Amino acid sequence: MIVAALMSLLFAIGDKWGAAFVVITSSAFNAATIVAWNVLDCASVEAFPTTIRTTAMGIQAAGGRIGSMAAQFVNAQLAANGVSGVASLLIVNAAVVCVGGGLCFLLPPQPAEDKRNSKLDYSFDA
């Protein structure tokens, strides 16, 4: 996420260095966000017991969609308050992505245990 935020900032100021730089930084931003969100989805779902993992993934996906819709309202407010230009919106994006990257450190260090499998007896009595 931090790499994505850095690429977003470079993309915001990239028009000074030409079109090739803008394409490279936007592609790197896209690649970094895809990798980061996939890793975050896997790591955060593993934090829940098996019985509720799909529910947790659904809630996270719904939260992401709601966040995407809320971002459009933030962009509109920034534009209405005189903040103009792509660079300012990308700086706000970079700040939010950094917050998302920092929240990863709040996840538990290990996946949740499945209590059902710990009660099974695998020993064979002759």
Image (cartoon, rainbow, N blue to C red):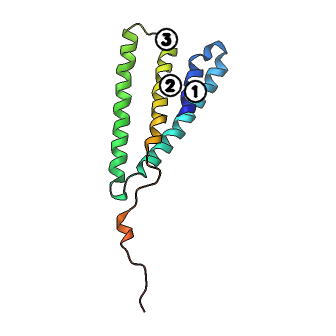
Q: Nearer the viewer, mark 2 or mark 3?
A: 2
User: What label does residue 14 carry, if any?
Assistant: none
Label 1 to label 3: alpha-carbon separation: 18 Å
User: Which residue is identified by label 3?
Assistant: 85
Amino acid carrying label 2: it is Ala
Asked whether 65 or 74 is in front, the reply is 74
Q: Residue at x 33, y 54 (%)?
A: 52
**Mark 1 vs mark 3: which is more N-terminal?**
1
Q: Residue, x 62% and y 17% (percent of image)?
A: 14
How far across and how far down the image is residue 63, in percent? 35, 37
Q: CA distance from mark 2 to mark 3?
A: 15 Å
Residue type at mark 3 is Gly
- Which quadrant, please, contains the C terminus? bottom left
Considering the numbered disc 1 on the image, is that residue within a helix, a strand or a loop?
helix
Look at 32% across and 49% down and name the residue there.
55
Nearer the observer, 20 or 11: 11
The secondary structure type at the circle numbered 2 is helix
Drawn side of residue 3 relative to residue 82, left or right: right
Which comes before the other along the chain, label 2 or label 1? 1
Q: Nearer the viewer, mark 1 or mark 3?
A: 1
* Callouts 2 and 3 close, C-beta under 8 Å: no
SS label for mark 3: loop
Q: Which mark is residue 6?
A: 1
Residue type marked 1: Leu
Image coordinates for residue 37, horizontal then vertical, percent: 48, 39
Look at the numbered discs 2 and 1 and tell me whether their residues touch, using CB distance below 8 Å: yes
